[in-house]
């Protein structure tokens, strides 16, 4: 277990605050940044970094989901359907992930994120603040939960990154509404994943709790800022964040 010095304590809580704001802004857990930081800066192996990041992500996701839900209420039946699909497919995909080459998977996932990001940027060029026409009815939204939570199980990250652009492109949702639905998908998946990592004793609770503590003070600010931005700018920021994530995933996959 990591025992921080006073300077480390300030650094970790500040890092958690930055990740909390980032997660609230984009409707994600922040693990895509926290995991490589924990591995590189604190020398954690991949599994320990992922388990520790989940300690931070779960409360951030819960607060973020609640704040988005206050602004964009989603019917309880749809939330439960998305959550049920997400929890089931996360467990199944995580089971198969252990048998696959993780480096190749990360590279392929990065390529997939590139395609989704370019779709969002293309949409921005076509129409600034007008939502895309819906191609499917809302009853099919749990299917996105299947895709997004499968990426959580296979790669440990990416549920919100995958689901949000799909909600925008296929179901005609505004960016902030799509992020709200994405949080409804990712949050139960993260809780299930944290339980699995904790059972395997792959969690540094001290580090994770300090990161979570910092995030508790900034998630709501990130959500509030997201709703002040114009739709087109929010969509573009999300797309560029996806491209940066994709580049990191592909490079790390090729290095391994």
Image (spheres, rainbow, N blue to C red):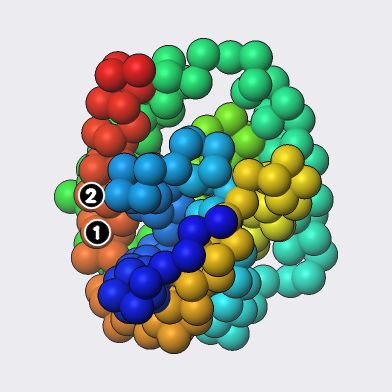
Which disc is residue 240 wearing? 2
Provide the residue designation for mark 1.
Answer: 237
Q: Nearer the viewer, residue 79 or 160?
A: 160
Dot 1: element? helix
Q: Residue reaching furthest left? A: 125
| Residue at image coords 63%, 44% | 202
Residue 94: quarter of image? top right
Relative to 237, is 92 above or below? above
Dot 2: element? helix
Residue 163: x, y in percent?
Answer: 52, 47
- Quarter holding the C terminus is top left
Instruction: Report if residue 119 is visible in the image.
Output: no
Instruction: Report if residue 243 is visible in the image.
Output: yes
Q: CA distance from mark 2 to mark 1?
A: 5 Å
Residue 4: quarter of image? bottom left
Residue 158: x, y in percent?
Answer: 48, 43
């Amino acid at each position: 277990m990591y025992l921080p010095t006073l300077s480390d304590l300030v650094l970790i809580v500040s890092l958690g605050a930055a990740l909390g704001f980032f997660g609230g802004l984009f409707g994600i857990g922040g693990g895509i940044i926290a995991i490589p930081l924990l591995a590189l800066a604190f020398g954690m192996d991949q599994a320990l970094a992922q388990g520790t990041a989940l300690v931070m992500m779960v409360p951030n996701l819960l607060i973020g989901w609640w704040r988005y839900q206050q602004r964009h209420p989603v019917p309880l039946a749809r939330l439960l359907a998305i959550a049920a699909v997400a929890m089931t497919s996360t467990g199944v995909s995580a089971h198969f992930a252990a048998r696959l080459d993780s480096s190749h998977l990360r590279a392929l996932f990065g390529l997939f994120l590139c395609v989704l990001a370019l779709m969002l940027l293309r949409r921005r060029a076509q129409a600034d603040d007008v939502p895309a026409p819906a191609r499917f009815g809302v009853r099919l939204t749990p299917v996105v939960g299947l895709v997004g939570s499968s990426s959580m199980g296979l790669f440990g990250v990416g549920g919100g990154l995958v689901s949000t652009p799909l909600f925008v492109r296929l179901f005609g949702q505004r960016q902030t509404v799509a992020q709200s639905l994405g949080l409804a998908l990712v949050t139960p998946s993260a809780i299930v994943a944290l339980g699995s990592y904790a059972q395997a004793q792959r969690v540094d609770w001290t580090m994770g709790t300090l990161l979570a503590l910092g995030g508790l003070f900034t998630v709501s600010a990130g959500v509030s800022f997201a709703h002040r931005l114009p739709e087109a700018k929010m969509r573009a920021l999300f797309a560029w964040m996806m491209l940066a994530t994709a580049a990191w995933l592909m490079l790390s996959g090729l290095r391994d």
